[in-house]
Amino acid sequence: MAAFPTVGRVVLVAVALVIAGCVTPVEKAEAPVLTKASIQERRLSKLPSGDVRGFPVTEVVWVHDSGSDVLPVFLAGTPGRRSRGLTGVSSLGEVAGMVFKWPETSVGSFWMKDTLIPLEIAFIDAEGVVFAVFEMEPCLEEPCPTYKPGGPYHLAFEWRAGTLAVSVGDVIHLEDTSR
């Protein structure tokens, strides 16, 4: 009986050595070199893309009475993206909203068909001045109300209702940083 505990210890030590031989030591990774481009890329990579896959992210400069802000936004600059907009989107994450851009001025209206979150929209003329702002409620069944500013616009900017205080007379410029 005295030999059994010794054999058990030998087996236990052998198993421990086998397991230890299977473990790969962890190597320290080198710290990445940070550049302005890599910092921007890292910041943009943290933005959500689940509901807005395929939309590039860019920035707008919003000039208002209290100063100015630079806001990350999704860009809807093609007919397909403008048509889709924020339909079906349940969260904007860290992105302020979506900017709709036309190559020339537009006079069309917006609606909230199948849009899940309450939004506000600002219509912006060719000089970058906001001339109309509307609050828009989600609409899951037709007929849905339409929102038309009553004049030509070059950009339209949508954001989650209640998060920004964009007003008529503010200036919004689209930055050329899309990815």
Image (cartoon, grey):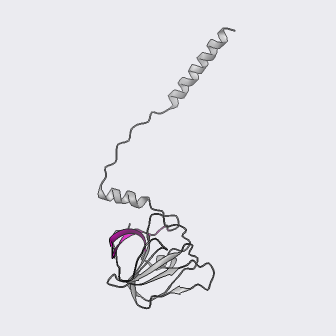
Q: Quadrant of residue 140?
A: bottom right
Q: Tell me: residue 146, above or below residue 75.
A: below
The image quadrant where one finds the N terminus is top right
Please, is residue 167 above or below residue 88 in the view? below
Q: Position of residue 157 (x, y in %)?
A: 43, 77
x, y percentage for residue 30? 35, 42
Residue at point 61%, 86% (across, down): 143
Residue 133, how many percent across, how many down? 44, 82
Total numbered labels: 0
Q: Residue at x 34, y 56 (%)?
A: 38
Looking at this view, name the residue that lies furthest to the top. 2
74 and 150: which is toward the camera: 150
Q: Which contiguous range is marked in magenta?
A: 52-75
Q: Is residue 31 left or right of residue 26?
A: left
Q: Is residue 81 magenta?
A: no
Q: Is residue 53 magenta?
A: yes
Q: Is residue 4 left or right of residue 179?
A: right
Main SS of residues in magenta? strand
Q: Residue at x 64, y 13 (%)?
A: 5
